[in-house]
């Protein structure tokens, strides 16, 4: 293609990749089994290179799709219009950890867990911890305002970003805010970038705020015979005055698929066949006595909600084993069956209604669902398994109608269609369930201001009509 030859004249050739195998690696992410090939992959090393690339693409109307680690679950990094897959993998340096100010400056291709560990070694804490933390990039986390178990007590990515270096589609480079804890100076462009799914600019550097590292945590596993009992306990824990650092739901079939496909095990005894749901509950802080008091308060609620047994993880290894089981659910369900993942979120007290409504829709439309995730936030990952559903029903209006009904249920329960995975490609057809025409008008106006040629991550978030 002519434009590729022209691009080679203005950037170093060794950042351009056209090999079929490499293109294939960037043609999919973790979203279902979707495949969309870019024409080329680019792996720039500097912000100036990104600026030159984006300016060229704006002038020549070449689509550019920013790419982090490709762990996204809504198809955001898929280059659906071809063009360039712009990989941020070379932007992998932690530039500064400023202990005096509880801040750090990083490049956007740093892996979440690498950053968490680096600040932990200095006694500091970066809480956002997606289950994909071992591979996802901080730039991808910004693009989705990613959460994770600790979002319950500490908030999501958006709560830790002070300032962003961004390259606009026009090639202009800007810092969106200021490296201060407070900033009331004009429109908040930093927060506008967060959650914009790579459609407004390419994030190259991030200034995060940090917290002191809590000294202790206690992890417990509560087992229930009825999933309703588990869900009903969740809001009551808060009403009883407790504030856990994580409160995750795992439906029985979630654990079954993890045990079947990963080799991990809860070591459940045969009497536990009747257990239908688990709550994984963590409290953290600096005062061990206070944590035990919190656990007693939580236990009271669990007992009032017919808990069968509460197990405490005594060692670091036991804690890690429980978290590994929780974190592998999505991947193990994907190994088990063709599936679709929904990221439903409702008001916390409406969690039982979301789960029972989803099960009823499963009965009506003929699918098995696996419900798990961030129950304390009212944010459930609903995995819909294909099972025996015909290809026609799976790929056609039948399943789409069922998913639409799940989202209508979310809306009726005070919620929305994504808590942390974003809209990307796969959820955009459902956006009209929760947003009005005025929302689309404003969002399209913002997009047009940032990206007048519409080159950056086109065909995402809303349907192009
Ligand atoms: C097993 C598993 C568990 C998960 N658990 C969680 C969880 O607990 N919580 C959660 O929130 N998510 C979770 N996710 C989803 C996913 O990991 C997150 O959305 C993550 O933030 C994506 O990061 P990434 O680097 O892989 O981004 P990608 O998938 O590569 O890209 C995601 C989006 O970000 C954009 N983007 C990437 N980098 C940039 C950049 N530098 N500038 C501008 N735009 C950019 C892309 O264009 C795309 O739209 C999970 C995924 C998996 C596979």
Image (spheres, rainbow, N blue to C red):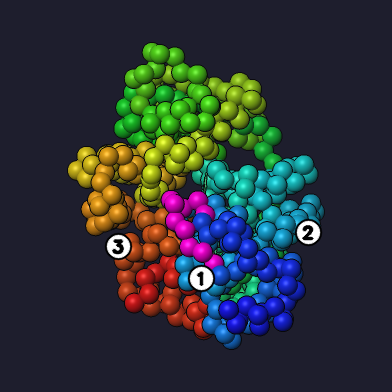
Q: Is residue 175 left or right of residue 194?
A: right
Q: Give the x, y percent position of residue 397.
A: 24, 57
Do the residues bearing badges 2 and 1 touch, measured as CB atoms within 8 Å?
Answer: no
Position of residue 38 relative to residue 455, above or below, is above
Position of residue 279 relative to residue 188, above or below, is above
Q: Give the x, y percent position of residue 369.
A: 33, 40
Is residue 35 located in the magenta-colored stretch of the structure? yes
Distance from disc 3 to disc 2, alpha carbons, whole Å, reads 42 Å
Answer whether residue 232 is visible to the viewer in this image: yes
**Which is more foreground, mark 2 or mark 1?**
1
> In the rendered structure, which disc, 3 or 2, sits on the residue that comes first in sequence?
2
Toward the viewer: 85 or 401?
85
Residue topped by disc 1: 82
Which quarter is ligand 1 in? Answer: bottom right
Task: Residue 129: name its quadrant.
Answer: top right
Residue topped by disc 3: 433
């Amino acid at each position: 293609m002519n434009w590729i030859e022209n691009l080679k004249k203005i950037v170093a050739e060794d950042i351009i990749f056209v090999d079929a195998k490499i293109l294939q690696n960037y043609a999919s992410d973790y979203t279902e089994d979707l495949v969309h090939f870019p024409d080329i992959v680019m792996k720039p090393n500097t912000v100036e290179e990104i600026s030159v690339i984006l300016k060229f693409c704006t002038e020549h109307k070449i689509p550019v799709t920013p790419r982090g680690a490709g762990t996204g679950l809504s198809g955001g990094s898929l280059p659906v219009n071809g063009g360039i897959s712009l990989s941020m993998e070379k932007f992998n340096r932690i530039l500064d950890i400023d202990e005096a100010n509880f801040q750090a400056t990083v490049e956007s291709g740093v892996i979440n867990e690498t950053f968490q560990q680096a600040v932990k070694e200095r006694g500091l804490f970066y809480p956002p911890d997606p289950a994909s933390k071992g591979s996802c990039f901080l730039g991808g986390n910004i693009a989705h305002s990613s959460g994770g178990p600790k979002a319950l007590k500490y908030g999501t990515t958006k709560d830790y970003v002070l300032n962003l270096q961004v390259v606009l589609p026009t090639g202009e480079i800007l810092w969106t805010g200021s490296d201060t804890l407070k900033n009331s100076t004009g429109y908040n462009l930093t927060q506008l970038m967060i959650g914009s799914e790579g459609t407004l600019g390419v994030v190259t550097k991030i200034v995060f705020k940090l917290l002191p590292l809590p000294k202790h945590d206690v992890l417990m596993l509560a087992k229930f015979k009825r999933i309703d009992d588990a869900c009903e306990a969740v809001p009551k824990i808060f009403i009883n005055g407790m504030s856990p650092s994580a409160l995750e739901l795992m439906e029985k079939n979630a654990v079954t698929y993890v045990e079947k496909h990963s080799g991990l095990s809860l070591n459940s005894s045969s009497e536990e066949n009747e257990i239908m749901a688990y709550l994984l509950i963590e409290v953290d802080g600096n005062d061990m006595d206070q944590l035990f008091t919190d656990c007693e308060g939580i236990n009271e609620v669990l007992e009032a909600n017919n808990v069968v047994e509460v197990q405490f993880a005594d060692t670091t290894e036991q804690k890690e084993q429980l978290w590994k089981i929780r974190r592998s659910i999505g991947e193990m369900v994907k190994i088990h069956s063709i599936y679709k993942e929904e990221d439903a979120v409702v008001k916390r007290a409406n969690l039982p209604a979301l789960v029972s409504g989803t099960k009823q829709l499963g009965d009506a439309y003929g699918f098995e669902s696996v419900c798990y995730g961030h129950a304390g936030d009212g944010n459930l990952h609903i995995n819909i398994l294909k099972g025996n559903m015909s290809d026609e029903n799976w790929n056609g209006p039948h399943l789409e109608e069922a998913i639409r009904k799940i989202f209508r249920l979310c809306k009726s329960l005070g919620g929305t269609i994504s808590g942390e995975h974003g809209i990307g490609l796969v959820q955009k057809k459902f956006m009209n369930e929760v947003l009005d025409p005025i929302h689309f008008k404003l969002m399209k106006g913002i997009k047009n201001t940032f990206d007048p040629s519409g080159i950056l991550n086109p065909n995402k978030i809303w349907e192009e009509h």
